[in-house]
Amino acid sequence: MTDAAAPSRNKVISNPYIHRLQRRHFLLFDIAPIIGTVAALALLPVLPFGATEIALLAGMWLVSGLGITVGYHRLFTHRTFRATPFAESMLAITGSMAGQGGVVSWVAIHRRHHEFSDRDGDPHSPNLSGDGLRGVLRGLVHSHFLWMRRHEYPNIAHYAPDLLRNRRLVNVSRHYYWWFALGVAVPTVVGGLVHLSWQGALAGLLWGGFVRVFLLEHIIWAINSFLHRWGSKPYESRENSRNGAVFSLLTFGESWHNNHHAFPSSPNFGLQWYRPDPGYWLIRGLSAVGLVSDLKNPAAEQIAAKRIRTDERKAAA
Ligand SMILES: [Zn+2]
Ligand SMILES: [Zn+2]
């Protein structure tokens, strides 16, 4: 039997073809938005920039960001609730617009992150690059950004068999590039129509496309990098995940990252009413109109049981 015939038993796949695809994705979706953002700033004096561009940036940022946290993360990776086929497809499509890979690959990588968090095998831990300031900086850059250039690809047959059985979802995932293109085309066309000019279209492309992708990526990546290093840790979990309360609105609730590692099957990352979690607000809204159901919130006693007492936290600090 050749190697190619037996990959379904392997947990990760590493070969030149996969690494070529990773490099291409990195250049197109991670480097290009940086260039586009610089271009948007450089062209400010000659292109329109006003309410339209800000609305396109904010609107597309909301749509694609909620697609990632509610769809890619809370629904498809962790199955924290159930969704109708229509809601499933919409969440997968809007998540694809973020440019963070097709849903099946994203889920496989993230499930591997939970399996090996902050240990060998974690695709993006900031804590495995050595000690001292140099190690800290190398770990941060790796976990934030550079790991995507080239990494062991988690075998989707091992990590996401449930998704592979869903033919509709596999179909959405296969067309990832087209959904991403749609997410860039919409602000371009709207910008062009509002200003009735090519300059308007270009401004829509830059602000609703490149700048929006750039900002969303770095906000989401900061969870992988900074929030596995600094922040508060109210709940017991075996890895070094932390909460960053001040970023909760900006990250759609993703910055309750310690809560999430402690209770990965909870759709509510905030866990308590006083911790704002916009992703969960959307889930509640979708539930109210019948598009999602079966929210697997942990019981108050389960949450209390994992709570680290303040004196223990002080002792650990
Ligand atoms: Zn997760
Ligand atoms: Zn994590």
Image: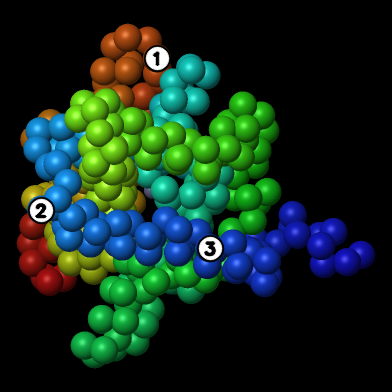
Q: Quadrant of residue 30?
A: bottom left
Residue depicted at x 50% and y 59%:
25
Residue depicted at x 52% and y 67%:
23
Which is closer to the viewer, label 2 or label 1? 2
Residue depicted at x 48% and y 49%:
101
Q: Is residue 250 depicted above or below 9 in this figure? A: above
The three-letter amino acid code for the residue at tag 2 is Pro
Q: Quadrant of residue 296?
A: top left
Q: Position of residue 241 (x, y in %)?
A: 28, 60
The three-letter amino acid code for the residue at tag 1 is Leu
Q: Is residue 87 depicted above or below 9 in this figure? A: above
Q: Position of residue 58 (x, y in %)?
A: 19, 37
Residue 303 seen anywhere in this rendered image of the structure: no
- The quarter in which the C terminus is drawn is bottom left
Side (left or right) of 55 relative to 70: left
Q: Secondary structure at mark 1?
A: loop
Side (left or right) of 240 relative to 47: right
Mark 2 → mark 1, Cα distance in angstroms: 45 Å
Q: Is residue 96 depicted above or below 299 in this figure? A: below
Dot 2 corresponds to which residue? Answer: 45
Q: Decide which of 100, 293 is in the foreground and name it.
A: 100
The image's mark for residue 153 is none
Q: Along the polypeptide, which appears first: circle 3 or circle 1? A: 3
